[in-house]
């Protein structure tokens, strides 16, 4: 792909990329006027926070010409050396504006707005460390609620659908999946097969010899 | 990493630099902070002193190729939740232009390619000026920050390789590979693709994909177009999908999951130097009929040079619950040295496990005063009123010193 593009756009090689170091203190509106004149999309616009990943995440990006790594890590890893007055903290860690108002209660909904977003800053262990501090069963999760006034739970009818839609949230409170294995292990219980239709078990067993043995 | 190790590392580095490089330039920032907040787990009030230090040491050698960069935080809380913590964000040596073809970074650093990102204790090598394609290789111990201290295992490792176009002004393309090892096993194996193309002086096409070699599915796919008829007006349309993947060492890697999909439409318009607007709509699909609609509107106004106002409204309706809220921020520059700011966040939300709407309100006010070109004092105080607290006051006082 890279070679093909090299051939297709060989004429661009003469138009080398601009080094932006000397423009680090320019006004964004000046940057964007220049960009437009060159046929380059304005960036650092109103959509920049949501959209910067594609440009900043690749190797060889030119972010470092204006920003040092603290600029990235303050937002992604809770640092506060550049914090402006609008920023809030969760404990000692600074948080971006996406963590609005009562984020402890709001995050189950907000985490669904692109479920991968949380993992761009937090390892799954972070979720578990927090949820571990709550007694099991104390959280209000739809599939875990009682059904009517009896002893039955919504769980039995809805947990599979909920788990398929948001399996990462199950891992938050059940990091070892022990509760899943009561029914989904091939060793005991109802032995319900949890694998997807196109399951590539060989790809897992060739990388680790532990996971398959949990159930088999 | 304990406070001792961070302190020793920073001290040793500074001694090394000051002892061997008399011509070096040292710059950075010290930020001394006092914070008070409510411990969400113990419900105790916490008073904490924190020291952030960011240092760059450049021009160590005559050619100016070697530099050191470091950034860390040490914090000490007092009261019932007595605690001492430290976090070293990065600390690396940067050697540029070796044989005019190689850049090296060694130490703790933030690395990324189109397949993923990580903080590592290790090495990054960039190979450049070898034609239209550049190459980057990184590898090292995976660093994970938890609630307090580091949460990863000592020898979890990340390894990444990427090849990318370097010299084309209107075209970007990268292919990369990222492997993560957990306790000696290969936990993740991901191929990343990233591309960008400018067309007709007013169109940008962009995309990113991550292919998981274990499940043989695309973990993430993103493709979008931006149309910018002027430098002040940008239309965005984007498609995104993701398929949850897990470490192979996790039992969750064997479970069936649904694909998540979303479509984003957005307009960003700066009417003039005083007013900017943005509107967005996001359609989300979670599989098996579950969906949500998210609407966003924002406006930034500068009625006079000294005053900035920002208002953002968000509304989400659909699967798992609804949120409806507004954020208002105001910033007034009294003079070149002093500013005051304040804001309100008001959210009404309902999770599908709740029967009624809940309301969360946040009020905050802050100010900053610059004593000198390199010294500033700032403070912020905040009150939260929500389903969990009838009153929850937190704040901070910060002294920044640039050197």
Image (cartoon, helix red, strand yellow):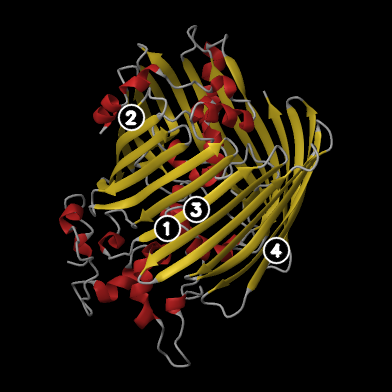
What residue would you read off at disc 1?
B262
Q: Nearer the viewer, residue B13 or B35?
A: B35
Nearer the observer: mark 4 or 3; the answer is: 3
Tell me, yes or no, whether the two marked residues, 2 and 4, touch with CB atoms within 8 Å.
no
Badge 4 is on which residue? B361
Q: Residue at x 37, y 28 (%)?
A: B124
Q: Quadrant of residue B363?
A: bottom right
Between the C-alphas of marks 2 and 1, the distance is: 28 Å
| Location of the C terminus of chain B (image quadrant) | top right
In the image, taking residue B375 as reference, residue B63 lies left or right, namely left
As helix, strand or loop, the secondary structure at mark 3 comes to strand
Residue topped by disc 2: B164
Q: Chain of mark 1?
A: B
* Residue under the image location 65 percent in, 47 percent down: A87
> In terms of sequence position, does the residue under pointer 4 or pointer 3 come before the other?
3
| Tags 2 and 3 both on a single chain | yes
């Amino acid at each position: 792909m890279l070679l093909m593009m090299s051939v297709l756009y060989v004429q661009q090689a003469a138009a080398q990329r601009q080094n932006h170091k000397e423009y680090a203190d320019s006004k964004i509106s000046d940057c964007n006027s220049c960009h437009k004149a060159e046929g380059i999309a304005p960036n650092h616009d109103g959509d920049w926070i949501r959209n910067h990943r594609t440009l900043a995440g690749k190797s060889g990006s030119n972010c470092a010409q204006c920003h040092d790594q603290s600029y990235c890590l303050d937002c992604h890893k809770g640092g506060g050396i550049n914090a402006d007055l609008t920023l809030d903290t969760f404990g000692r860690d600074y948080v971006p504006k996406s963590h609005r108002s009562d984020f402890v209660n709001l995050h189950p909904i907000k985490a669904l707005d692109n479920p991968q977003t949380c993992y761009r800053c937090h390892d799954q262990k972070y979720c578990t460390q927090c949820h571990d501090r709550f007694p099991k069963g104390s959280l209000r999760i739809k599939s875990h609620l009682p059904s009517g006034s009896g002893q039955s739970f919504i769980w039995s009818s809805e947990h599979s659908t909920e788990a398929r839609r948001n399996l990462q949230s199950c891992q938050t409170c059940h990091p070892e999946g022990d509760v899943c294995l009561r029914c989904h292990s091939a060793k005991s219980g109802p032995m319900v097969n949890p694998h997807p239709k196109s399951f590539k078990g060989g790809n897992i067993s060739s990388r680790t010899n532990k996971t398959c043995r949990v159930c088999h | 990493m304990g406070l001792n190790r961070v302190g020793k590392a920073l001290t040793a580095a500074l001694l090394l630099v000051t002892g061997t490089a008399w011509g070096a330039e040292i710059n950075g920032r010290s930020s001394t902070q006092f914070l008070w907040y409510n411990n969400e787990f113990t419900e105790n009030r916490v008073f904490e002193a924190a020291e952030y230090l960011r240092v760059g040491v450049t021009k160590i050698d005559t050619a100016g190729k070697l530099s050191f960069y470091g950034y860390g935080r040490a914090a000490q809380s007092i009261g019932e939740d007595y605690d001492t913590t430290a976090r070293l964000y990065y600390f690396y040596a940067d050697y540029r232009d070796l044989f005019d073809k190689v850049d090296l970074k060694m130490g703790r650093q933030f690395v990324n390619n189109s397949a993923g990102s990580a903080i590592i204790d290790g090495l990054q090598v960039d190979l450049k000026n070898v034609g239209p394609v550049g190459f980057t290789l990184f590898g090292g111990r995976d660093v994970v920050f938890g609630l307090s201290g580091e949460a990863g295992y000592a020898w979890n490792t990340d390894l990444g390789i990427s090849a990318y176009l370097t010299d084309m002004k209107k075209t970007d393309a990268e292919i990369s590979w990222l492997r993560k090892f957990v306790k000696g096993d290969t936990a993740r194996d991901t191929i990343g693709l990233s591309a960008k193309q400018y067309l007709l002086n007013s169109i940008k096409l962009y995309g990113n994909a991550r292919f998981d070699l274990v499940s043989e599915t695309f973990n993430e796919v993103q493709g979008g177009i931006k149309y910018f008829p002027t430098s002040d007006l940008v239309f965005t349309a984007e498609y995104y999908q993701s398929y949850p993947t897990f470490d192979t060492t996790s039992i969750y890697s064997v479970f069936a999951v649904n694909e998540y999909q979303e479509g984003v439409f957005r307009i960003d318009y700066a009417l003039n130097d005083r007013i900017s607007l943005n509107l967005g709509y996001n359609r989300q699909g979670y599989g098996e009929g579950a969906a949500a609609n998210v609407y966003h509107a924002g406006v930034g106004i500068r009625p006079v040079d000294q005053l900035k106002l920002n208002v953002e409204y968000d509304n989400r309706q659909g699967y798992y619950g609804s949120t409806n809220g507004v954020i208002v921020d105001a910033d007034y520059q009294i003079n070149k040295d002093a500013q005051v700011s304040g804001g309100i966040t008001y959210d009404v939300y309902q999770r599908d496990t709740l029967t009624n709407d809940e309301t969360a309100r946040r009020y905050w006010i802050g100010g900053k005063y610059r004593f000198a070109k390199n010294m500033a004092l700032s403070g912020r105080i905040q009150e939260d009123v929500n389903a969990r607290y009838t009153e929850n006051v937190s704040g901070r006082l910060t002294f920044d010193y640039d050197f």
